Image (tube, helix red, strand yellow):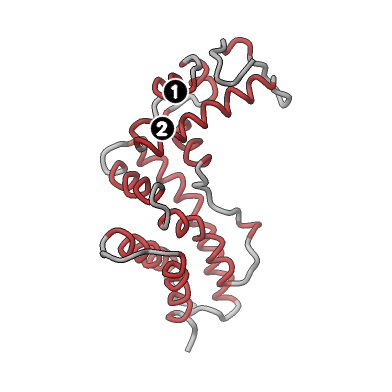
């Protein structure tokens, strides 16, 4: 059965070996959700709208993603909005900063994805579900950044008195300011320069 075909969620199997139809359905739903997100922003991600776009029952969408927050987060993850795991870090300051911030830099240079970031920031002020998902993503992101800072300070690559939260605000704030607040092009080189400047400013004297 094709993933775009309406199916009854009762046909789905449980356990580690899912029915291939289930996997196709999940993929179809997330593909549809990602397309909706890119076209209309996070407010478009509801069980009803995504189910209709994927041509599945609303019950199926709820079965796999019980809350709108679950569905929104899965959609963002499908679009690459995930942080590297701490185990993926190399222990080298500048490469690890590039690994952590690379997706953000790439998104901000993309004419479709950059507006999505701006929309997410705006919707987080008014939509509690978007706020919750943003906070979940940050809860994944911040420990990785903290680990990078801790490793670098212990190795003597960065000052020991760095406030990781303020450092993160400085880096991301610079990205956002240069991308959305100034009439200039934000490119990968600009993003990397911000990371280079952070390292230079915070190298022990």
The residue located at (39%, 62%) in the rendering is 172
Q: Is residue 11 left or right of residue 69?
A: right
Which corner quadrant holds the N terminus?
top right
Q: Are marks 2 and 1 in contact (CB under 8 Å)?
A: yes
**Picture coordinates of residue 15, whole percent (x, y):** 70, 22
Q: Identify the residue under disc 1.
A: 53
Classify mark 1: helix, strand or loop. Answer: helix
The residue located at (55%, 26%) in the rendering is 28
Classify mark 2: helix, strand or loop. Answer: helix
Q: Which of the two residues, 56 or 203, is positioned nearer the viewer here?
A: 56
The residue located at (58%, 29%) in the rendering is 27
Q: Earlier in the sequence, mark 2 or mark 1?
A: 2
Residue 42 location, quadrant:
top left
User: How many C-alpha atoms fall within 10 Å of the one at disc 2: few (<14), some, or many (≥20)?
Assistant: many
Q: Which of the two residues, 6 or 158, is positioned nearer the viewer here?
A: 6
Q: Identify the residue under disc 2.
A: 36
**Picture coordinates of residue 156, whole percent (x, y):** 57, 81
Instruction: State the mark number for residue 184.
Output: none
Q: Which of the two residues, 6 or 43, is positioned nearer the viewer here?
A: 6
């Amino acid at each position: 059965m094709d993933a775009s075909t309406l199916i009854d969620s009762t046909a789905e199997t449980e356990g580690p070996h899912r029915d291939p139809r289930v996997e196709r359905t999940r993929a179809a739903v997330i593909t549809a959700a990602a397309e909706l997100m890119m076209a209309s922003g996070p407010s478009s991600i509801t069980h009803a709208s995504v189910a209709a776009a994927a041509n599945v029952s609303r019950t199926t969408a709820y079965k796999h993603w019980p809350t709108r927050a679950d569905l929104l987060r899965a959609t963002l993850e499908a679009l690459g909005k995930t942080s590297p795991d701490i185990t993926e870090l190399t222990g080298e300051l500048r490469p690890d900063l590039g690994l952590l911030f690379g997706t953000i830099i790439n998104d901000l240079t993309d004419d479709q994805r950059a507006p999505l970031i701006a929309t997410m920031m705006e919707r987080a002020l008014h939509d509690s579900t978007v706020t919750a998902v943003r906070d979940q993503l940050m809860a994944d992101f911040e420990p990785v950044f903290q680990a990078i800072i801790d490793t670098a300070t212990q190795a003597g690559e960065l000052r020991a008195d760095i406030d990781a939260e303020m450092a993160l605000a400085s880096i991301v704030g610079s990205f956002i300011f240069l991308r959305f607040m100034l009439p200039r092009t934000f490119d990968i080189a600009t993003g990397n320069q911000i990371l280079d400047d952070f390292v230079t400013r915070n190298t022990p004297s």
